[in-house]
Image: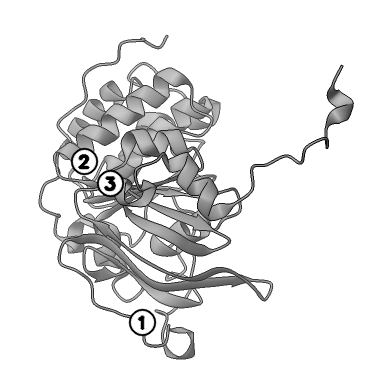
Amino acid sequence: MHSDHPTAAPDLSVPEATDPTTADAVATDATQQADPQANGAQPVSGPAAPVNADSAVPDRTALSLRGMRKSFDRTEVVHGISLDVPRGSFYGIVGPNGAGKTTTLSMATGLLRPDGGTAHVLGHDMWAEPHEAKARLGVLADGLRTFDRLTGRELLTYVGLVRGMEPAVVEERMESLLSALDLAGEDGKLVVDYSAGMTKKILLASALLHAPRLLVLDEPLEAVDPISAQVIRKILTAYVDGGGTVMLSSHVMELVEGLCSHVAIIADGELLADGTLDEVRRGGSLVQTFIDLVGGGDVAEGSLSWLES
């Protein structure tokens, strides 16, 4: 049975990155089913690379995107997005459904090969230096298949060992994360039998296990019950307070406004605004700024008159 009063969060301060030759024994998160690099994909270059893109990566940037583009069926859905996520920030990406948020994050984290552009994780090129970049990165991707026929404990053990972590370190961190995320009594269950909230929490634990410096989370609180959502918020806040950087996507403005220090607004595959929360909302609410930039939200007068009694 779940407790309404989860154990206090563990120390989530971020240590110096472990030597990529051991911590990144596998070039991708263990929860991924495939890696474009492993299938022979090469770093983006030549005609596919952005023309005259500013490739400089600021020293205090955790994630830097330059000219990211992607097309499906000859239709471009992400149009040259460039942005910088400062180290130590809680950075939110907001946009309507279908805006290109998930596609952008998938390219930034190596899950999807871009048609053009670059992504740097703490100065390491995601496509030219995938081992170094992914050793410093934790990912919770919305809808990504995982090894759900393992128990929660087995999944975390596998994730840690495949990353080259020492078994004793894996065990210590796993116990801490299971307790903090209120999963200690559920770790013997198969992940396939977890609720949506429990699944989000075990995947967050998987992303945190190797103490990455950057977390990229796609809709981390979607379909999560209020108690689990509060636990996840506390864990992420503790992680940022300890020196980590979080980048998350959401279409819930109130969530981003309550958590994030920085925000970017994306619509129709384009970056409409980015900066600190105060810079973007310009003295108003994030919701109103979003509506002003993206448009929509009005119902024509009389269009639903048939609903009136």
* Residue marked by disc 1: 53
Amino acid type at circle 3 is: Leu
Amino acid type at circle 1 is: Ala
Image x and y of residue 281, in percent = 38, 46
On screen, residue 263 versus residue 169, left or right, reads: right
Compared to 180, does 239 lie above or below?
A: below
In terms of depth relative to the viewer, which is nearer, 171 or 59?
59
Compared to 175, does 303 lie above or below?
A: below
Residue at position x 33%, y 24% from top?
Answer: 231
Residue 240: mark: 2
The quadrant of the image that shows the C terminus is: top right
Residue at position x 78%, y 37% from top?
Answer: 301
- Residue farthest bottom in this picture: 46
Amino acid type at circle 2 is: Val
- Residue count near mark 1 (Cα–Cα under 10 Å), binned few <14, some 14–19, many ≥20: some
Compared to 198, does 217 lie above or below?
A: below
In terms of depth relative to the viewer, which is nearer, 88 or 164?
88
Image x and y of residue 249, in percent = 44, 47
Q: Secondary structure at mark 2?
A: helix
* Residue marked by disc 3: 161
- Residue count near mark 3 (Cα–Cα under 10 Å), binned few <14, some 14–19, many ≥20: some
The quadrant of the image that shows the N terminus is: top left
- Residue farthest left in this picture: 16
